[in-house]
C-alpha cells in the first residue's frame, strides 16, 4: 500500500475565474483506492495555503508517489511544484498527467525533477505503472507513458481507450472540500452554488482542427442508468442537485440523451442541469431541447466558432449555421440561459469574415457570448497544418488566457484583430435589448448586475493583451 499525493495546478485569474472539480484526478484516485493505495488531493486552485500549504500537507502525508495534473497554461506552476516536491522528497517518483503532458511530453520531461509523463487517459496506465514504481523496476512494458532513458525521451504507444466507461469507479468525491468549490463559479454561466461536475461521455467524433485528442476521436458514452446512479449517490450523500455536464458532445446520441432526461423525470430527482460546453447546436431538435428543459436544464453553451461557411469547412467543424441559429434561439425561448463561443483569427480569415461572425453573434437571442483568439495548441491538427509557417509552437503561457492570443493566423494585423475582438464584446454586451433579456432571466438581480459590470470591464475595457509570436 502506497501513499499517493495528487496535485492539481492553478490558473484562476480575473479573466478566467471559473474553477471546476478536477475529475481526471478524482477518477485516478478511485482507481488507486481499488488497488489498495491511499490517495490524497491537493488542489492549488482551492487551498488557501498555496505552495507552502502544499509542502506542509505533503510533509504530514509522506507520499510514496506524487502525481501532478496540469493544463498547458499552468505549466510554469507545474514546474515549480515538481521542483519543490523534489527538494523536499528527493527519492519520491514524480508523475505529470493531464492535457499538458499528453500534448507536450517532451517539454514536461525537460524538467529534471519529473520522472514520467502520462500520455492520454490515465486509469489503465496508473494501474500498470504503480507496481513498477513500488518495485523500483523500469516501466518498459507500460503503455501510455513517456520517460528519459540514457538521456533521450522515450514515448510509449498509448493505452487503448476505455470502451466500457461504466466499468470505471465513480470519482473520489470525498477528497474534495465541496464548500470551497461551491463558493466559486463553475464553468457554466450560473452563479456560485453547491454543485458537482459530471463526465457522462468521452471524446467527440468530429474532426475540428483546433481541438485536442486527449480522449481520441471515437465517441464513448456511459449508459443512462450509470449516469443517473451517480446523480442519485451525489444527492443522497451530499445533497447536491446542481450538475454541470462537461462532455465534449453530450447530445451526439439522441436516444441516450432523451433517456437520461426521461430517467431524471421518472425518478423525480429535482435536479438543475448546466451544459458549459457539450451541446452541438445543429444536431439538436426542438423536441430534445424541450426534453432537456423538462429534465431541469437551466444553462447551456453552444460552440459556433465562425459564421463563415468557408471557414467552417476549413476548420472541419461544418456547422449548419441556420440550424444552429434556430436551436440557439429556441433554447432562449424556453427560458434556458444561453451562451455561445466564437473564435476570431482563424488561418486565412479576413476582416469581413470576422465581422460576419460578430454580426451573427449579435443577432442571436443569446444572453452571453465569448469571443476568443484562435491559438494552435500543439497536438492539434491546426498546429500540424501550419507548423511550416509557425515552426516553434512552444509558446510562453505564463501570462496566457483564452481571451488573448499568442499567434495571429488571420489576414488582418494583430492590432486590428484585437480591436475587432474589443468591438465584438462592446457590440454584443452594450445593447439595451440584451441587457433587458439578461435582467429577466436571472433571479438574483444584484449578483447579475455585479457580474455583468465585471464582464464588461474585463472583456471590453481592459487594454491588456498578449504578445504575438512573430
Image (cartoon, grey):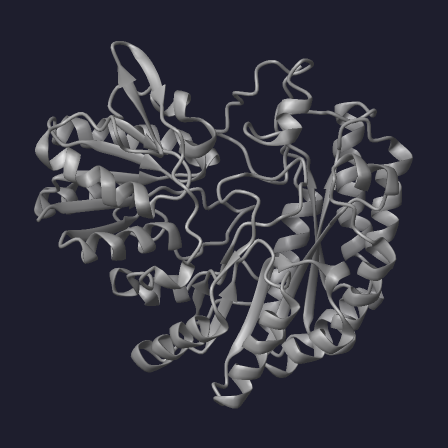
Give the answer, above or below, for where 73 lies relative to 199: above
Q: Residue furthest right?
A: 352
Query: Which part of the image, by quadrant, shows the C terminus?
Result: top right
Based on the displayed image, in which of its 4 quarters is residue 7 positioned? top left
Give the answer, above or below, for where 183 lies relative to 85: below
Q: From the viewer's perspective, is 32 left or right of 259?
A: left
x and y, in percent, of residue 434 in the image? 79, 65
Q: Residue at x 87, y 32 (%)?
A: 351
Q: How many marks?
A: 0
Q: Residue at x 30, y 78 (%)?
A: 237
Q: From the viewer's perspective, is 74 left or right of 133?
A: right
Q: Residue furthest top?
A: 151
Based on the displayed image, in which of its 4 quarters is residue 90 positioned? top left
Q: Residue at x 49, y 90 (%)?
A: 268
Q: Is residue 444 visible?
A: no
x and y, in percent, of residue 413 in the image? 79, 23
* Nearer the observer, 315 or 237: 315
* Nearer the observer, 365 or 296: 296
x and y, in percent, of residue 4 in the image? 17, 45
* Nearer the observer, 228 or 276: 228
Q: From the viewer's perspective, is 218 left or right of 142?
A: right
Q: Is residue 346 visible?
A: yes
x and y, in percent, of residue 70 in the image? 39, 39
Give the answer, above or below, for where 62 lies relative to 172: above
Amino acid at each position: 500500500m502506497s501513499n499517493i499525493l495528487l496535485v492539481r495546478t492553478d490558473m484562476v485569474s480575473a479573466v478566467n475565474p471559473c474553477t471546476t472539480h478536477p475529475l481526471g484526478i478524482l477518477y485516478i484516485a478511485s482507481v488507486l483506492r481499488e488497488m489498495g493505495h491511499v490517495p490524497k488531493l491537493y488542489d492549488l486552485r482551492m487551498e488557501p495555503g498555496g505552495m507552502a500549504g502544499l509542502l506542509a500537507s505533503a510533509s504530514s502525508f509522506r507520499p510514496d508517489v506524487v502525481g501532478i495534473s496540469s493544463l498547458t497554461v499552468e505549466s510554469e506552476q507545474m514546474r515549480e511544484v515538481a521542483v519543490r516536491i523534489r527538494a523536499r522528497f528527493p527519492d519520491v517518483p514524480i508523475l505529470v498527467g493531464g492535457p499538458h503532458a499528453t500534448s507536450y511530453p517532451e517539454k514536461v520531461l525537460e524538467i529534471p525533477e519529473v520522472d514520467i509523463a502520462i500520455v492520454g487517459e490515465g486509469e489503465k496506465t496508473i494501474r500498470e505503472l504503480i507496481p513498477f514504481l513500488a518495485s523500483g523496476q523500469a516501466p518498459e512494458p507500460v503503455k501510455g507513458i513517456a520517460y528519459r532513458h540514457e538521456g533521450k525521451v522515450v514515448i510509449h504507444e498509448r493505452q487503448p481507450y476505455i470502451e466500457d466507461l461504466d466499468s470505471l469507479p465513480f470519482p473520489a468525491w470525498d477528497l474534495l472540500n465541496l464548500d470551497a468549490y461551491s463558493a466559486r463559479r463553475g464553468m457554466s454561466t450560473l452563479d456560485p452554488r453547491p454543485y458537482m461536475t459530471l463526465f457522462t461521455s468521452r471524446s467527440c467524433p468530429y474532426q475540428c482542427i483546433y481541438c485536442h485528442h486527449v480522449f481520441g476521436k471515437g465517441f464513448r458514452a456511459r449508459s443512462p442508468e450509470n449516469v443517473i446512479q451517480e446523480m442519485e449517490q451525489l444527492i443522497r450523500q451530499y445533497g447536491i442537485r446542481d450538475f454541470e455536464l462537461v462532455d465534449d458532445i453530450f447530445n451526439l446520441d439522441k436516444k441516450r440523451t432523451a433517456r437520461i432526461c426521461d430517467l431524471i423525470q421518472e425518478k423525480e430527482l429535482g435536479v438543475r442541469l448546466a451544459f458549459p460546453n457539450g451541446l452541438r447546436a445543429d444536431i439538436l431538435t426542438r423536441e430534445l431541447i424541450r426534453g432537456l428543459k423538462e429534465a431541469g436544464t437551466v444553462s447551456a453553451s453552444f460552440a459556433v466558432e465562425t459564421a463563415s461557411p468557408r471557414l467552417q469547412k476549413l476548420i472541419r467543424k461544418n456547422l449548419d449555421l441556420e440550424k444552429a441559429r434556430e436551436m440557439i434561439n429556441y433554447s432562449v425561448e424556453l427560458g434556458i440561459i444561453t451562451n455561445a463561443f466564437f473564435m476570431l483569427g482563424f488561418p486565412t480569415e479576413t476582416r469581413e469574415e470576422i465581422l460576419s461572425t460578430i454580426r451573427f453573434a449579435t443577432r442571436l437571442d443569446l444572453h452571453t457570448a465569448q469571443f476568443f483568439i484562435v491559438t494552435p495548441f500543439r497536438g492539434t491538427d491546426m498546429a500540424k497544418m501550419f507548423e511550416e509557417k509557425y515552426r516553434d509552437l512552444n509558446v510562453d503561457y505564463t501570462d496566457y488566457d483564452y481571451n488573448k492570443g499568442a499567434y495571429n493566423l488571420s489576414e488582418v494585423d494583430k492590432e486590428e484583430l484585437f480591436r475587432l475582438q474589443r468591438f465584438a464584446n462592446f457590440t454584443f454586451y452594450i445593447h439595451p435589448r440584451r441587457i433587458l433579456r439578461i435582467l429577466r432571466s436571472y433571479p438574483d438581480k444584484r449578483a447579475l448586475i455585479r457580474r455583468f459590470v465585471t464582464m464588461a470591464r474585463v472583456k471590453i475595457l481592459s487594454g491588456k493583451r498578449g504578445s504575438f509570436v512573430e
